[in-house]
Amino acid sequence: MKYNRYCNILREDLEELAQIVNSLVSKGCTPLGGLTVIQAGQKVFYNQTVVVEDENNNTLGVYVPGESFLKDVMQLIKEGKKLQAVKLYSDKTGISLSEAKDWVDSNC
């Protein structure tokens, strides 16, 4: 069975995000990169990516194709399809296209 190797955790509450990340670390996951702050109108979201190196570690759940959209966003950027990448990010996170564009510009 194939398991997820990484997961993006998006929360409005920074303490809740820290608790989740710490719990995943205790189960063999590692934070990847820094914390990303996303402002969506009046709301602020915090995003942390975690990875698991052991492909037999099922902490992040069973892999379901199509769930990991950030990889798809990055691939679209590599292909020169920035508008599609922005739209995909907006659709998956629920933020506006303008905010998604800002995120893509800052992180891709």
Image (tube, rainbow, N blue to C red):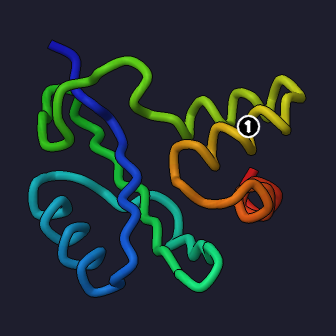
Q: Residue at x 35, y 84 (%)?
A: 14
Q: Residue at x 74, y 44 (%)?
A: 86
Which amino acid lies under the numbered mark 1 shown in the image of this protein? Ala
Lateral position of residue 88 relative to residue 97, left or right: left
The front one of 5 and 9 is: 9
Q: Residue 22: name its quadrant.
A: bottom left
Is 99 situated above or below 37?
A: above
Residue 18 at x, y percent in the picture: 27, 78
Q: Secondary structure at mark 1?
A: helix
Q: Residue 1: name its quadrant.
A: top left
The front one of 50 and 80 is: 80
Residue 95 at x, y percent in the picture: 60, 60
Q: Residue at x 73, y 37 (%)?
A: 85
Q: Residue furthest top?
A: 1
Lateral position of residue 20 relative to residue 43, left or right: left
| Number of marks present in the image shown | 1
Is 63 situated above or below 24?
A: above
Q: Residue at x 24, y 53 (%)?
A: 29
The front one of 15 and 28 is: 15
Q: Which residue is mark 1?
A: 85
Is 92 situated above or below 78?
A: below
Lateral position of residue 42 relative to residue 22, left or right: right
Residue 101 at x, y percent in the picture: 79, 56
User: Counting other residues with Cα less than 10 Å from the Cα at mark 1, is it few (<14), some (14-19), or many (20 or more)?
Assistant: many
Residue 88 at x, y percent in the picture: 64, 37
